[in-house]
């Protein structure tokens, strides 16, 4: 098995894949530039601790990871949100539910933004503090964005682990009971579907239509939106691609689907991403590579102003994922 912690640099994929044109060269060759627009979103990764070890995880999150945002860093995040008043605050992990300060973060951050998102794999939410956490999220109008890679139990558990599918379905039904994703409710429940192998997702419209129909017919589950995203070739997914001899084909497939029309809507253009230890990145994927925002390691306590229009964005060959097909926003 290869070690996902070796060769962690922006040219990780390029160094292993023959004939792949570097992403930055593709931009230059087409006369394109990827630079920042208005910064409206604060994305916060509260740690790499997770109750699952998903095969597609770009951060190698799992049950034994010790990297968890502490109270001091959580307080610094809250101060940052108070200073800049972002339109959207996006809380991710790992499994954010497992962070000991998640309730404080939700309670303090939700009133500071128009939209606060809690990303969940559903099984962590179904575990400890379920009712208290969902009560808190609902009371503060927090949007829940939940991962459900497949409607096929075998496929889903191949990616996420044994017994995760039934637990996920049960939690979705529980969220509906709270009003999440239900018609007429202002509590938004969104789903995220990722392919379970080395291929790109089908049309988002088609995937959403199928999920909506099957979930309603089989389990009476409703939701607001579904997002179909490709898996990013970093972390554990990179290791799996390499070990299964799918890396070269997958990277070339992403590059072949490069769509310049996706650039304007990329999430890195409008957000700053904060790691569990409080350092700044252009996106959560760049955290996997330690590719710091602005090219230098900087803590949120040192941030005097948000990155301005036209500021540079750190890129690597993993950026082909976000610009393939319909893109990753």
Image (cartoon, rainbow, N blue to C red):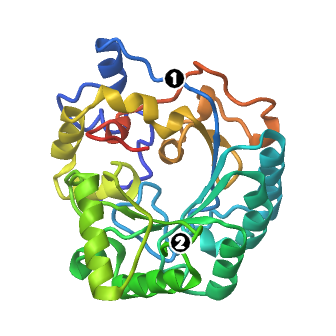
- Residue name at image x 40 percent, y 32 percent: 316
Q: In the image as oriented, which residue stretches furthest toward the front? A: 184
Q: Nearer the viewer, residue 17 or 309?
A: 309
Q: Describe the element under mark 2 as helix, strand or loop.
A: loop
- Left or right side of 221 for 38: right
Mark 2: few/some/many CA within 10 Å (<14, 14-19, 20+): few
- Left or right side of 307 for 29: left
Q: Is residue 299 above or below residue 276?
A: above
Q: Quadrant of residue 257?
A: top left
Q: Nearer the viewer, residue 306 or 239?
A: 306
- Residue name at image x 37 percent, y 70 percent: 148
Q: Nearer the viewer, residue 328 or 179?
A: 179
Mark identifier at residue 329? none
- Left or right side of 259 for 58: right
Q: Nearer the viewer, residue 175 or 296?
A: 175
- Left or right side of 329 for 118: right
**Circles 1 and 2: CB distance less than 8 Å?**
no
Mark identifier at residue 35? 1
């Amino acid at each position: 098995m290869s070690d996902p912690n070796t060769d962690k640099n922006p040219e990780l994929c390029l160094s292993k894949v023959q004939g792949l044109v570097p992403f930055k060269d593709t931009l230059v060759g087409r006369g394109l530039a990827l630079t920042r627009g208005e910064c409206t979103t604060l994305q916060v990764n509260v740690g790499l601790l997770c109750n699952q070890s998903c095969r597609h995880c770009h951060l190698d999150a799992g049950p034994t990871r010790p990297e968890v945002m502490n109270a001091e860093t959580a307080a610094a995040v809250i101060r940052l949100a108070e200073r800049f008043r972002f339109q959207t605050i996006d809380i991710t992990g790992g499994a954010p539910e497992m962070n000991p300060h998640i309730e404080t973060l939700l309670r303090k951050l939700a009133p500071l933004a128009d939209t606060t998102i809690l990303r969940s794999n559903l099984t962590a939410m179904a575990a400890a503090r379920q009712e208290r956490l969902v009560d808190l999220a609902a009371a503060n109008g927090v949007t829940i964005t939940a991962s459900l890679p497949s409607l096929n139990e075998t496929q889903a558990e191949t990616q996420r682990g044994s017994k995760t599918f039934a637990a996920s379905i049960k939690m979705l039904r529980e969220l509906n009971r709270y009003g999440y994703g239900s018609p007429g409710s202002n509590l938004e429940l969104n789903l995220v579907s990722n392919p379970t192998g080395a291929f790109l997702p089908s049309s988002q419209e088609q995937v959403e239509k199928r999920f909506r129909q099957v979930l309603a017919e089989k389990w009476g589950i409703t939701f607001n939106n579904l997002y179909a995203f490709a898996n990013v070739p970093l972390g554990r997914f990179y290791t799996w691609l390499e070990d299964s001899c799918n890396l070269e084909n997958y990277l070339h497939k992403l590059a072949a689907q490069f769509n310049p029309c996706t650039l304007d809507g990329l999430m890195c253009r409008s957000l700053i991403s904060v790691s569990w230890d409080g350092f700044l990145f252009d996106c959560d994927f760049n955290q996997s590579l330690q590719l710091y925002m602005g090219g230098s390691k900087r803590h949120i306590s040192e941030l005097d102003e948000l990155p301005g229009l036209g500021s540079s964005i750190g890129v690597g060959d993993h950026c082909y994922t976000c610009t393939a097909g319909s893109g990753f926003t």
